[in-house]
Image (cartoon, rainbow, N blue to C red):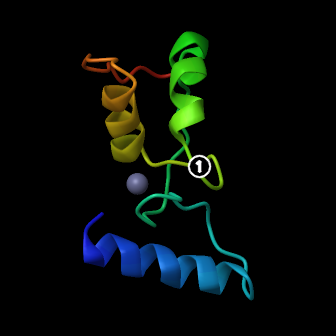
Amino acid sequence: MEVFYCLRLWTKLLLHRFVLLNAFCKECGREVHDFIAPNDVWARVEPLIGRGKVLCYDCFCKKCWEAGIYTTWRLVSE
Ligand SMILES: [Zn+2]
């Protein structure tokens, strides 16, 4: 993990103890937007996710690669 991401994450984890923050990625600290992962993909990726279970889209895609899911995702509205 890059130093900047690490510092951002630690800062947000510390602030989260004292103030209400928007949801943030537990890997890199970036604020997250809601997205839905297919159940079969989530089942394979979830064991690779550490603390919190909240990831931004980029970090989720990295976990997909770690899980052996090599694909490009399509953004569609619900
Ligand atoms: Zn992230």
Q: Position of residue 5 (x, y in %)?
A: 34, 70
Q: Residue at (32%, 38%) from the top-left corner?
A: 62
Seen at 50% across and 48% down, the residue is 55
Q: Nearer the viewer, residue 50 or 38?
A: 50
Residue 52 appears in which quarter of the rendering?
bottom right
Q: Disc 1 marks which residue?
A: 54
Pick whichever, 55 or 19, lies toward us.
Answer: 55
User: In the rendered view of the protein, which quadrant contains the N terminus?
Assistant: bottom left
Decide: few, some or many residues near mark 1? Use Cα within 10 Å; few <14, some 14-19, many ≥20.
some
Q: Is residue 67 left or right of residue 48?
A: left
Q: Quadrant of residue 75?
A: top left
Where residue 51 appears, as percent x and y from the top left, is 63, 55
Residue 4 falls in image quadrant: bottom left
Horizontal and vertical percent for residue 33?
A: 50, 48
Q: Is residue 77 above or below residue 6?
A: above
Horizontally, is 56 left or right of 44 in the view? left
What residue is drawn where x is 73% and y is 83%? 17
Secondary element at tag 1: loop
**Residue 73 or residue 40, whichever sits in front:** 40
Q: As shown in the figure, which amino acid type bears the numbered disc 1?
A: Val
Relative placement, left or right, of 53 versus 77 is: right
Is residue 78 visible in the rendered image? The answer is no
